[in-house]
Amino acid sequence: MTRKFPPATPCRISVTLRGGEVACRERDFSRGDPHDPLSDDEVSAKLRGNLDRVASSTDRGEILTDLWNLEELEDLSPLLAPLKQDLTTTGAQGSVP
């Protein structure tokens, strides 16, 4: 695997099942790498999942719309707002519905 690096970033995971059988999978590029890009739907789902604990569903929708129209934004403040919250006083979930 070392010989593949760079340009690849290989990873191999082996799991030994209770019956002793070994399941092994290997990839040269992680999902989202330019060699194995995410679809638009996968990018949208990933963003929603990452914002689930810091933004309401309405805010997630607005942020997603802004992301897909990034070239039309005057600045990045709509995308950065969820990252500027202090969740230490409200807990991991905050008051987000």
Image: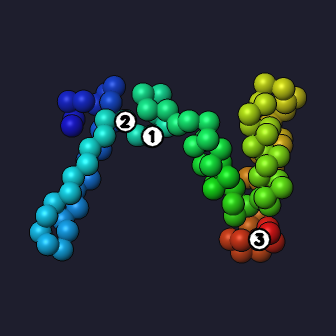
What numbered label is drawn on residue 31? 1
Identify which residue is drawn at 74% across, 37% down: 67
What's the residue type where badge 1 is placed? Arg
Looking at the image, residue 32 sits to the left or right of residue 7; the answer is right
How far across and down, in percent of the image, does residue 78 sit?
83, 43
Looking at the rendering, which quadrant does residue 91 occupy? bottom right
Which residue is the site of mark 2?
29
Above or below, comparing residue 66 to residue 71 in the picture: below
How far across and down, in percent of the image, does residue 33 sit?
46, 33
Above or below, comparing residue 2 to residue 44 in the picture: above
How far across and down, in percent of the image, does residue 16 sit?
18, 65
Given residues 82 and 13, the one toward you in this image is 13
Quadrant into which the C terminus falls: bottom right
Element under disc 3: loop
Which residue is the site of mark 3?
94
Q: Of circles 3 and 1, which is in front?
A: 1
Mark 2 near mark 3, Cβ–Cβ under 8 Å? Answer: no
Q: Residue furthest left?
A: 20
What numbered label is drawn on residue 49? none
**Mark positioned earlier in the residue sequence (2 or 3):** 2
Element under disc 1: loop
